[in-house]
Image (spheres, rainbow, N blue to C red):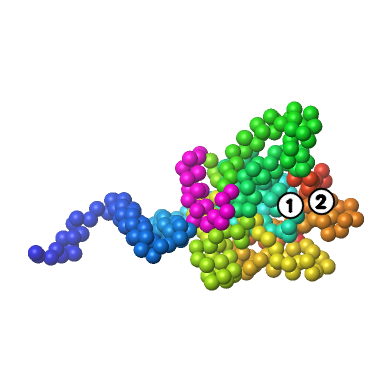
Amino acid sequence: MECLTFLELLSFADVEKFEDTEKLILELWKEREKRNIINRAAMNDWEIAKVVAELDRINQVQLEDHTSIQQALTEIYEAPWEDKIHVDSATTGIQKLDEVTGGFQDGEVTILAARPSMGKTDVMLHFAKMAGWAGFLPLVFSLEMPEKLITSRLIASTGGINRAKMRDPKRMLTQKQKDNWAGVIGDLTETNIQIFDGAGQSIGEMRAKTRKLMHQFPDKKLIVFIDYLTLIQSSQSYSGNSHMQVTEISKSLKTMAKEYRCPVICLAQLNRSVESRANKRPMMSDIRESGSVEQDADVILFLYREAYDDKDSENHSLEIIVSKNRNGPVGMVAVNYNEHTGRIEDQKEPNLILA
């Protein structure tokens, strides 16, 4: 068979259809690779988490990530003469914290870290319902606390009910609280919070569930909450090397936020070094396996309550310490926190201290 010359081959080319052809080839390649992964998984008896991670890696391959500097400069050229386009960020529900951070931004990872009993979960649920009421779709991946307890906490904080009463509402709630019950339920329904409480979920599993919700709610912007970092299942065991596990998870969180163009807020625990200091306000180095977390996170928030360490203190504020803020200032915002109900509220005279 006679070989075609380059010019003869070129005559068959259709430049206008190049991008469509490129996409088609990529999709066919993805399908082939997925079949290969399934075959290898069956032959080598892979765990489900590894299969999901490998399939997710194939789905991440994309072509439309290219922008020329000319195009980028053209889009920003008129900026000095145009009104700034309002970008919808998810509110934290705390006025001064929104002023410092700009709210939760698409593509950014926020780490919320504190010692036990400081109020991490209550703050996370406050963020989630405030974002929900603002029109976002909050996804809560609770790797430690079951859905029933999450729901109970949401009701308690929203209705101003002591959490201890939620163990037996019929017997322990006051008549006024019972009269308000339907209203509280109605308000929480409007947040549209989605709860996933499976233990040991991997980033791949969370990505799959997030992608599913994106298709179910195409008109909603998503915001993802994860409780908490070191309970996330890594794709490999790394021979028990926790630093490498956290490094993989930290980078995967950033990839997830960037690819899905949504904020990701992940809770983290502190190591025990903070307990040995006189000043127990957290620092970056207090985060367990802090190196990769500090590098990959866009915002790092710490929580501190003086009254927790000093029982005689009259300061019952909850300090939200903005320790890292890639696109803004750092500092501290004080809010009112009721540890019995879990309710978070702005202070009447907001306390904002910028570093």
For image coordinates 76% across by 66% down, the residue present is 274
Residue 109 on image: x %, y %: 59, 56
Q: Quadrant of the C terminus?
A: bottom right
Residue 313 on image: x %, y %: 89, 55
Q: Would residue 265 be found to the left or right of residue 304 on screen? A: left
Upstream in the sequence, badge 1 or badge 2? 1
Q: Look at the image and give the residue range highlighted in magenta.
A: 197-219
Q: Any magenta on residue 215?
A: yes
Residue 119: which disc? 1
Q: Quadrant of the N terminus?
A: bottom left
Q: Any magenta on residue 51?
A: no
- Amino acid at pointer 2: Ser
User: Residue most toward the left?
Assistant: 1
Report which quarter residue 85 is drawn in. Answer: top right
Q: Would residue 259 be found to the left or right of residue 187 on screen? A: left
Residue 127: which disc? none
Sort mark 2 into few (<14), some (14-19) or many (20+) by Cα contacts within 10 Å.
some
- Do the numbered discs 1 and 2 sit on residues whose CB atoms are within 8 Å? no
